[in-house]
Amino acid sequence: MGKTEVTSAAEKKTPLPVVRRLSIYHDLLVSLKEKKVKNTSSTIIADILEYKPIQVRKDLEMTGLVGKPKIGYDVEELLEAIKQCIGWSYQHKAVLFGVGNLGSALLNYPWMMEYGLVFEAAFDTSAVRSNILIYNIPVHHTSYFNEYIKRHKVDIAVITVPPQFAQDVANMVVSAGIKAIWNFTVARLKVPSNVIVENASFTISLAVLTQKLSERKF
Amino acid sequence: MGKTEVTSAAEKKTPLPVVRRLSIYHDLLVSLKEKKVKNTSSTIIADILEYKPIQVRKDLEMTGLVGKPKIGYDVEELLEAIKQCIGWSYQHKAVLFGVGNLGSALLNYPWMMEYGLVFEAAFDTSAVRSNILIYNIPVHHTSYFNEYIKRHKVDIAVITVPPQFAQDVANMVVSAGIKAIWNFTVARLKVPSNVIVENASFTISLAVLTQKLSERKF
DNA sequence: TAGATTGTTAATCGATTAACAATC
DNA sequence: TAGATTGTTAATCGATTAACAATC
């Protein structure tokens, strides 16, 4: 009931703020890799992102990778270490519910190589859109999901349906044993505590922007 | 060069973590308002969001609204106070660049009533899509932007073009005097320091999800 | 009234930053 | 080599949480 004891091993739980920044370093490293840059350093990364070098160094330490004094880090090695740390080395199998504009945008995004995500199927209640391929991903009628799940492993359910249907979808995927939901709707999903829900709300980001704007204006 | 002095007045700068949570309270309050709930309290809000009541209370304090002991807060008053605090009371005029799937999804979202955002125009380089209305918003060819900006006030530029074109768009809108950019691409935009850029990256949210999944798996 | 909730002041906790010896 | 960068230990800072009197 009180604080849980730290389990024996050196279980260095990565703090959330670090995870978020690691994903930002990730994108930067991908662009460095594309430019054939071999090495980088906390100083360089900090410069580009306008962070403090010490913060970058501390964050990178969490990946377990050790750098070389004077040299810094090998770009590819660091990229792999970060992917490992935030779970982007493993290919998570995903299905998507709600093939509207946003859903289509997600299906069309190159998640697989860099972000550890593979869309294996999509579902939509619109019969018109059923049984076709969108960006090479099969789109089924939502009613087919319970059949689908019998034969396919699914790690993550992505929800991009209209908000009033989000809970229904959540219930369905939870019943099917899916343990992680990436929720793009405003709906606040009620799920058992062993299911992870991550809300990908644009509006939080908008709030940061408009708040800064307001501060500046007055 | 060192620390800047706090300017005379009671300029209670809202910390970023608070801004983010306020936007979450906002969405919750909207749903309470729709359900005709009159009053709420930090206890109730905390319960729903699985936060600590004291944290909610501290956050709400930042809006300047004072609650009533025993009663709590008036839902509508609190909603307005939060909107004021995060800049969603003012209607920010926005234009969008890149009318693909994601751009269309954004144009079709009901930002105006609750999120202080109004899309007044969109721009795309695809001639086929020019001079039409999408969700009642005029879509122009991108080359028309420099004419458009002469006659219209724009607070925020939203960028949903392919990443390789994002910097070009940023340059264009910065030249036109726009002071805020909401960037949905992975591109890291270089802009003058007086321009606000907010990156609305899905991938940060994905990192949080996959990291939690990995932690659980092993 | 009694109980629940507020606002405020103080304590704790965790994250960021600083300092510095070690080193390729 | 000298200089830049690392990893580590300690100090600071800010955000979260606790405690509690005030009150509708």
Image: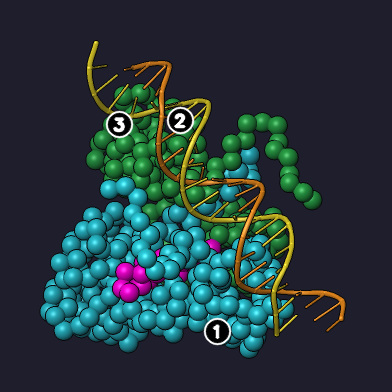
Chain colours: A green, B cyan, C orange, D yellow
Q: Nearer the viewer, residue A128 or A94?
A: A94
Q: Quadrant of residue B112?
A: bottom left
- Report whether B192 appears left or right of B12: left
Q: Nearer the viewer, residue B192 or B108?
A: B192
Q: Nearer the viewer, residue D16 or B144?
A: D16
What is the quadrant of the C terminus of chain A in the image?
bottom left
- Please name the amino acid that badge 2 sits on: Leu
Image height of A147 relative to A110, above or below: below
- The residue lying at 51 percent from left, 69 percent from top is B62
- Helix, strand, or loop for circle 1? helix
Label 2 with label 1: CB-CB less than 8 Å: no
Nearest to the eye among marks 3 and 1: give it. 1
Image height of A197 relative to B10, above or below: above
- Please name the amino acid that badge 1 sits on: Glu
Give the residues drawn in magenta, as a range. A199-218
Of labels 3 and 2, earlier in sequence is: 3
Tag 3 and tag 2 share a subunit: yes
Q: Which residue is mark 3?
A: A39
Q: Which residue is mark 2?
A: A65
- Helix, strand, or loop for circle 3? strand
- The residue lying at 69 percent from left, 77 percent from top is B69
- The residue lying at 29 percent from left, 43 percent from top is A47
Q: CA distance from mark 3 to mark 1?
A: 54 Å
* Mark 3 surroundings within 10 Å by alpha-carbon count, few (fewer than 14), some (14 through 19), many (20 or more): some
Tag 2 and tag 1 share a subunit: no
Q: Which residue is mark 1?
A: B77
- Helix, strand, or loop for circle 2? loop
Q: Quadrant of residue A187?
A: bottom right
* Mark 2 surroundings within 10 Å by alpha-carbon count, few (fewer than 14), some (14 through 19), many (20 or more): some
Which circle marks residue B58 in the picture?
none
Residue A203 included in the magenta stretch of the image: yes
User: Is the magenta region chiefly helix, strand or loop?
Assistant: helix
